[in-house]
Amino acid sequence: MTNDMTGPDNGRKPGDAPDKEGRLKAAEGPVPAEIALPELLAGLERLDRAYDDEAGPPPLGMLQAQLIAASERHRRRALREWLLFGLVSLFILGFSLLAITSAPPVYWTVQGLVPIAGIIAAAMRRGRKGRGERR
């Protein structure tokens, strides 16, 4: 079996000591607790330092501020969408009423062109999908 040198300690086992050329020399027999325990504690301290900032939960005040900001953004976005919906619907209704009352031929022309434009747009989209052009 070969040594796996991919871990954070390059495959080093507790009690391994490098020789003069920098290669690891395996300990003969079981590792005494006097050697293994300090190495384990040092490794745990390194892990604690490495993950200390990432592991702690954020403060409650910061979470509350983020929740308040997210709910405010959501409320503003919903208000903007409703306002846009209202304006567009008023424009469409106003245009339709104006067209019906003032010029019935214009109204019927628009009523005929809208489905034709939809069919043309669908055909163009279908053609692009068939050729593999996707936006």
Image (cartoon, helix red, strand yellow):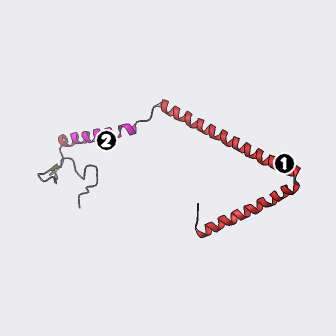
Q: Residue 38 occupies which quadrant of the picture?
A: top left
Q: Amino acid at mark 1?
A: Leu
Nearest the viewer among 135 and 53 is 135
- In percent of width and height, residue 43 lies at 26, 42
Tag of residue 98: 1
Left or right, 25 with respect to 42, comes to left
Considering the numbered disc 2 on the image, is that residue within a helix, a strand or a loop?
helix
Residue depicted at 76% across the width and 46% down the height: 89
Q: Quadrant of the C terminus?
A: bottom right
- In percent of width and height, residue 12 lies at 22, 51
Q: Residue 76 occupies which quadrant of the picture?
A: top right
Considering the numbered disc 1 on the image, is that residue within a helix, a strand or a loop?
helix
| Earlier-in-chain disc, 1 versus 2 | 2
Left or right, 64 with respect to 6, comes to right
Range covered by the magenta-colored residues:
37-57
Identity of the residue furthest to the bottom in this view: 131
How far apart are the two marked residues, 1 and 2, measured between alpha carbons? 73 Å
Q: Residue 125 occupies which quadrant of the picture?
A: bottom right
Q: Main secondary structure of the magenta part?
A: helix
- In percent of width and height, residue 34 lies at 18, 40
Q: Amino acid at mark 2?
A: Leu
Tag of residue 40: none
Residue depicted at 11% across the width and 51% down the height: 20
- In percent of width and height, residue 56 lies at 40, 36
Task: Indicate whether residue 114 is drawn in magenta.
Answer: no
Residue carrying label 2: 47
Q: Are marks 1 and 2 in contact (CB under 8 Å)?
A: no
